[in-house]
Image (cartoon, rainbow, N blue to C red):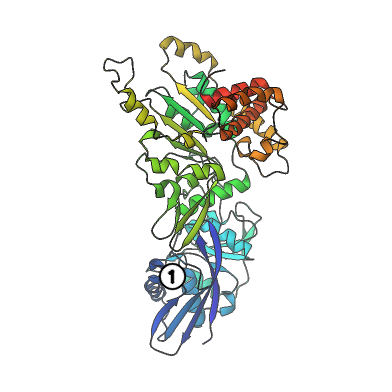
Amino acid sequence: MAVARTRCIALIGVTGHPVDVEADVGSGMAGLHLIGMLDTALSEARDRVRSAVVNSRYGWPDARITVSLFPASLPKRGSVFDLAIAVALLAAAGVVPRARVVEPFFLGELGLDGSVRPVRGVLPAVLAAAGAGAGTVVVPVHNAAEAGLVPDVTVIPAANLGELVSWLRSDDPVTVPVPVAGSAPRTEPPHLGGGPGGARSSSPDDPGEVVPDLGDVAGQPFARRALEVCAAGGHNFWMLGQPGTGKTMLAERLPTLLPPLGRDEALEVTAIHSVAGALPTDRPLLTRPPFVAPHHTATVAAVIGGGSGMIRPGAVSLAHRGVLFMDEAPEYSRTVLDSLRQPLESGRVTVSRALGSVTFPARFMLVLAANQCPCARPSGSDDPCRCAPAARRRYLARLSGPLLDRIDVKATLYRSTRRELLADRRFIEPSQVVAERVLIARERAARRFAGRPWRCNAEMPTRALHTDHRPPPKAMSPLLRCLDSGELSARGLDRVIRVAWTLADLGGRDRPEIEETNAALGLWLGEER
């Protein structure tokens, strides 16, 4: 018997690496030996594969079986290799033609009864397979819709090992075209998979779900305007105020103001959620910006990413191209809060472990909300706040100066009276109306950034802010005065200029003038100007 070879994908972070799976059935003491820098889950594949093959009514070779995963120096984790190992083994034993398994990639976990179970990270794995020149990828039937998002790849959904082997052994060339979302129609065996023939695109919004709307927020006109500015420019936002002033309501409605994700952005976001195991089964493609709100007890690994075995993306990566909301921000560990500083600057996060480092994308809008004191009692209640000034300072001091320096827009929210709420209802706008202005502003910025990699004003680098996109000297004068007096840091100056550009885009101006820079300075300081 000769060596049989097929292919699979090893995921490191959200990056896939092709792996050759070689199987040899030879003489020697009977047993299955796996080699190639494997983790515990992959080492246990020998038992899953043996049971799946036997329960699929195929004989188990009474010989020494060696399965090598190449390159040997690449770490391989998880159960995604089960299907490739089984197929290579059966090809080496002569059960299926060796030539049929050389070209396709096989992804999936095997159940003891031979069923092919879904796995995480199918989208980035199929993208890597396509980059390696794959024409056909076999995936679990429940992952077929996700895999079908990759163009120019034939996706074969497999429900169990027996049906897959029958297809591999079949000489019948007759296939039927099945349309798969995201690409041109492709072909697959008509009998294989026991489920839908291909992927279908679906809306990320549940029809029965109540979508938040900015029109639900009465009062806080300054905060609503600040939210619009943040959405138009991709800026970070901090809200300080008593309980019940609408901080959480405003944060939850920010994603409704953001434009839908572009094709490349949607694939990028979907790949991250797929690796994290957070991709809904009925939504193979996420087309709306994500909204992630971790609990204040979350650890650094939960927020930044990590894990003892396979490194998983954290909340900052799950919020990529969307919103990361941290309610009651001073209640978070200071270590967690300060760990946000690096991804806020670079748009990515690197997690280092003993076995290596993994980099995840993390370009998100940060929204922080905080009460004014630890007790959070309203000042006008029957039982008012009795926190000492020193306790209030310690409470808010958990938000470090360097972190707040990276917040573009700040707002203090106060309780609205009944008369103010009634009067403000005439000026309330629904999310759809505000989102149209946000989209127009982003389109103006996109035209200005034509040929550049920046998507919004918040991504403009410092060099561009002070060369091609520097406001006129008159508009810069109030900012330079604050810089000289120490009210603004150099980083704060850059962020105010970015907000000024956003205000100019919202106002339909070609460049920010002194009105925009004054207003941007007020937003950065948390004051109305």
Observer able to see residue 431? no
Judging by the rendered image, the residue that carries numbered circle 1 is 38
Q: What residue type is labelled 1?
A: Leu
Q: Is residue 469 above or below residue 68?
A: above
Q: In this view, does 227 lie above or below 20?
A: above
User: At 35% across and 30% down in the image, what residue appears?
Assistant: 394
SS under mark 1: loop
Quadrant holding the C terminus: top right
User: At 59% across and 63% down in the image, what residue appears?
Assistant: 129
Q: Position of residue 358 (x, y in %)?
A: 50, 57
- 315 displayed left or right of 391: right
Q: Position of residue 217 (x, y in %)?
A: 47, 22
The residue lying toward the viewer, choosing from 344 and 43, is 344
The residue lying toward the viewer, choosing from 161 and 3, is 3
Question: Which of the 4 image quadrants contains residue 233?
Answer: top right
Observer able to see residue 370? yes
Q: Where is residue 335 in the image (x, y as percent from the top left)?
A: 40, 43
Within 10 Å of disc 1 (Cα), the crowding (few <14, some 14-19, many 20+) is: some
Q: Position of residue 131 (x, y in %)?
A: 63, 62
For the view shown, which residue lies furthest in the left direction? 383
